[in-house]
Every structure is written in C-alpha cells, then in structure tokens.
Amino acid sequence: MSLSWAGYRRARRRSRQAWAVLGAAAASAVTATVWFFTAGQFIAAEPAVSGPSEAPVFDAAWMKPVTSPYPVPRGGAAAALEALAVKGRASGSDYDRSAFGQAWQDADHNGCDTRNDILRRDLYDVAFTKGSKCKVAAGTVHEPYVGLVVRFVRGASSKDIQIDHVVALGDAWQKGAQQLTAQQRQNLANDPLNLIAADGDANQEKSASDAATWLPKNKALRCHYVARQISVKTAYGLWVTQPEKDAMARVLDSCPQQQTVGPR
C-alpha cells in the first residue's frame, strides 16, 4: 500500500506527539519517585496529628531577655528566610555540648535556671517545690510537637517532657556557631526563643536534625516551628543548607502570612 507525502507527514507528527506524551509521563514518574524517596514517604506515613499552632516565647512578668548578636527582624518569615546565607555544613566532628556553656544556667539572671523558666512558661497549673518560687514540681502542658496533653511531675515524669532546642545545638555548631563567642553560644543555648518544652520521645527522635529531615508530627505547629528556627538563625547569624531552606520554604508556602517569632 502506497503512502502519500501528506499522509506520511501526518503519521510522523502523530508519532512525535506520542513520544512527547511518553516523555512527559516518564519525567513525571521520575519526579514522583524522587519526591517519594526524599520527603514523600515520610509525609505519606505521617498520622493525622493536631495540637497547638504555636508555642510560648517570653513572659515579661518574670523573665528577662537574653541578648542575641542581632535583633529578630519583624515581618514575614519567608522574607527572613531569603535573607539567610545558604552554605554547606561545617564539620561536626569536634562538636561538644560544653562549647555552649554549662547546661541550664540562669542566663537571664532572674534567679531561676533556664530549665525551670521554660517549664514555668510552657506549663499551666504549675506547682513549685516546697519553699521555692522557682523549681517546678508539677504542671500540665498541651505538648506542641505531638499534640498530647501531658501531666508533668518532677522525677516521676521528667523524661516525658524535655526542653528542646528549636535549632539544635549540634546543628548550630555546623552552621555558624563556631564563629560565635563563648558568651553568645551560651545565650543561644539558653535563649527562650530557642527553647520549647516538648515530648521526650519527639525530642530524642529529632536529635540534631534540621527542617530538611525532621518536622513536628503536629502539622498545625509547623509554620510557627519553621519561623522560629528562621528567627533563631537570624538572631545568631547562623546559616541554612539548601535542602533545609527548600524544606522551610515548602512549609511556609502553606502559610504565606507567617511572621517571624520573637519576644514581642
């Protein structure tokens, strides 16, 4: 059977279109596969968790500000993210917690150590140990990372509620904290902006992770959590990696009006 020139051109055009469709489908499949094996598998596996949409920062009635090298800028968190430097991680092999000073000092000089300050700030129905107006003996918290309401009792359930560094100190060490002074690192470790009373298991699971590899299971908190990390990194001159920045930007895409977080 003979084929006219016009017929040949039509057949060739249909063939090119078919290959284009197949190519687009293949590209979409590759993109979906890459997404799944990076972030998608974690998102797909996440249970539906709800809880607080933000966590306390500062109570001027009894807390005093901790000085950071730079002020937290007012305005959109997305704009503050764009202003952060993007670099690779520095070596973490020489990280030591002692580089950030003795744990839980009275950094704001209000008469109470930082751990008790944060428990008092984040818990409600707080009771103090006998004869103390500082040491928290018990209280209740609507925990922000997993959304559970937890009763805290000193000693009996101390491990259930731990104080999390929003920007983990190990992460900070690899992203600029090595260049801070010893006093500035101590302030970073004790700054209420960088501290949240959190579920003990969630805190251990997070470890030194950044936003690229760990986010709270309570999705309602994620915009605040990421904005708080951005605010801490801005205040202490720390940088982000490209995967970390991309993860933060994805979270903030769902809340474009999210503001930076600070002791207003």
Image (cartoon, rainbow, N blue to C red):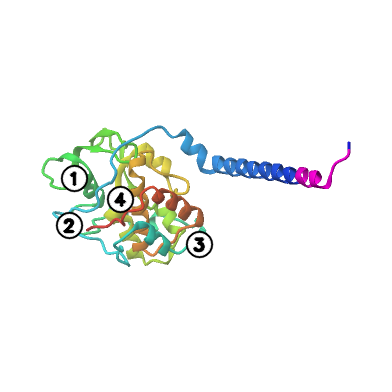
Mark number displayed over residue 195: 4
Residue type indicated by callout 4: Leu
Q: Is residue 196 visible?
A: yes
Instruction: Using the image, determine if residue 245 lies above or below residue 47.
Output: below
Determine the secondary structure under disc 4.
strand
Q: Nearer the viewer, mark 4 or mark 3?
A: 3
**Magenta span of residues:** 2-12
User: The N terminus is located in which quarter?
Assistant: top right
Along the line of sight, which residue is nearer the eye, 119 or 135? 119
Mark number displayed over residue 110: 2
Q: Nearer the viewer, mark 4 or mark 2?
A: 4
Q: Distance from label 2 to label 3 (Cα)? A: 37 Å
Q: Nearer the viewer, mark 1 or mark 3?
A: 3
**Which residue is at 22% across, 53% downward?**
58
**Which residue is at 34% across, 37% downward?**
146
Question: Can you identify the residue that label 3 sits on?
Answer: 87
Q: Earlier in the sequence, mark 1 or mark 2?
A: 2
Residue type indicated by callout 2: Asn
